[in-house]
Image: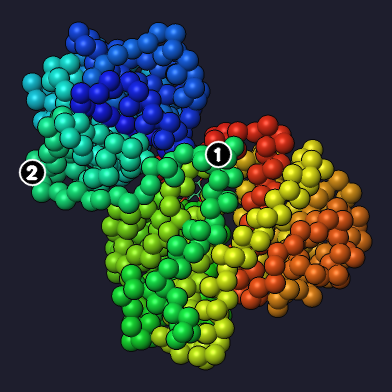
Amino acid sequence: MCGIIGYVGSEPAVPVLVEGLRCLEYRGYDSAGLAVVTPDGALDVRRAPGKLKNLEAELRQHPMEGSYGLGHTRWATHGVPNEENAHPHRDNSGKMVVVHNGIIENYVHLRRRLSEEGYNFETDTDTETIVHLIASLYEGDLEAAVRRAVAELEGIYAFAVMSLDEPQKIVAARQGPPLIVGLGEGQQFIASDVTPILSHSRRVVFLDDEQIATVTPAGVQVSNFAGEALQVEAQEVLWDPITAQKGGYRHFMLKEINEQPEMVRDSLVGRLNRSRGDVSLPDLGLDAAGAEAISKIFLVACGTSWHAALVGKFWIESLARVPVEVDYGSEFRYRDPLLPAGAVVCAISQSGETADTLAAMREAQARGAGLWAICNVLGSMATRLADEVVYTHAGLEIGVASTKAFTTQLVCLYLLALRLASLRGTLSPEQLAERVQALATLPRSIEMVLTGEGQFVSLAQRFADRHNFLYLGRGPLYPIALEGALKLKEISYIHAEGYPAGEMKHGPIALIDPDLPVLGLAPQGPWYEKILSNLQEVRAREGRLIVLATKGDAEVAEVADEVITIPVCHPDLTPVLAVVPLQLLAYHVAVRLGCDVDQPRNLAKSVTVE
Ligand code: G6P
């Protein structure tokens, strides 16, 4: 939800800021803008509605220069996505400028008051309030004005401000959305995430809520909202800047789909003991007594991560015999959940910054539950709130439609289920060892699925003109049906619904006709016979059946119009393998329709507003 970037140093600021915005564009692409201070000391602001490429075109026509400045890529909340509402926003003197990610909840009240005081508002945004408020409180010290302003702001925000009165300085504040300071030699950065910083520096400071950073070429000073100076430690980020490039693929999404074998392998490193037939999760400080003491696990997440949670529930309940509830972050926080003694709330989040998931975690914390996170981003808020963190090692995920983060979340949930089962003695050593061996072969099996990519190009050709799709699965493949439908709708804008196959006869069966493609998930496993019967019901009503089956299954071939196969694998692991063809199908349908795969309309990768 909006990306912000700031640079102070001796390099020309414009290319650094534009490149930074390119890395952050996944956070929103309704408009983009830059503000730099030119060599002769003037403030130059350029903004363009739509994607970054529009701003770049404007900069090619009318180049600008500067040695420090701010940039912003917007996901609109208040005010339509036009040029006026694009950030950065200026104060009335034209000397001060601000970029913001978040929502100012009391902006109506502040706007009215500031208007009465004579401040002239030019946009419909909540953000403009911030710059006028700071300007109204400015008495020669920008940091002090920011501190006075945050005392009046309600809502969530990460913002950065600069003023011509204090050259070569950016002041940034965080209350909610992520904000990171990148430390270089004689140049410093602020950004919504580490990606724009990686090609300049690996040393970063993750700001906490209620912190203010004052950044100059010489370094950064961090203080809290109360004005106390804080000692902050820089962390080394190990992500490779190359990951932030497409590496020869047409889209990040396709690159990330293809990275899944490697990332699953990375997520297993150090966690599988094949000779002992056991798993370890060193990051989760859990012993047998701790595992026994868990009365219930609440998995909370949003979007694709929520689908991972649904699969996790199956695994944890069936293997470790611990009751699990799955909640949307946005529901958990408001439903007054009953958390028994010994409850653990485990948040699942790729970014670790999703506002609703973080709010659910805070709710859990306030109610005294144990708090875990399964997360992909080191230093993110979820990892800092949680008592224990299991990291997915998916690397940087840029495509808005999540793929490799999902499969590595599944791997971590399966490892968690096995670890709990091992500690609680709910699986025999043989049962455990069999699953450890199966996990070890998973990356190779995903590779085998990926070699069949060509099939999805031709499937896409035949089905891209449909307006609706139905995805059916049972057991842990029901969440995969949901995920397959979500992938298709978010990047191709085709309406798709995921359904538990057994429920189909209670409604969706009415939709079935020769125009409706039905994608049935029927790999070998405990649910095979049941789903096959459901698919027969579809066939009897002349639905077009695409069936995902285990390689070599002749029975499925008789029911289906089209068959997609996955290799033979342990039945527990079919959800991980089954999602990969669905990702490829969605991808190729979207490409065929000419959709913007990496930046689908209206979406953003990190939803940092409620
Ligand atoms: C957004 C993204 C999804 C993601 C969801 C949760 O909606 O577009 O891909 O699954 O947020 O994000 P998280 O970072 O918490 O996993």
* Total marks placed: 2
Q: Residues within 10 Å of mark 1 (few under 14, many from 20)?
A: few
The front one of 136 and 248 is 248
Residue 75 position by quadrant: top left
Residue 148 visible in rendering: no
Amino acid at the residue labelled 2: Ala
- Percent coordinates x, y for residue 24 in the rendering: 41, 35
Q: Which residue is nearer to you in this view: 101 or 343? A: 101
Above or below: residue 434 compared with residue 412: below
Q: Residue at x 23, y 45 (%)?
A: 203
Residue 332, horizontal then vertical, whole percent: 44, 59
Identify the image quadrant of residue 494.
Answer: top right
Q: Is residue 371 left or right of residue 269?
A: left
Q: Above or below — where is 334 with respect to 163? A: below
Q: Name the residue tied to disc 2.
A: 229
Amino acid, disc 1? Gly
**Mark carried by residue 248:** 1
Quadrant where the image shows the N terminus: top left
Name the residue rendered at 46%, 55% in the picture.
394
Scheme by which the image is coloured: rainbow
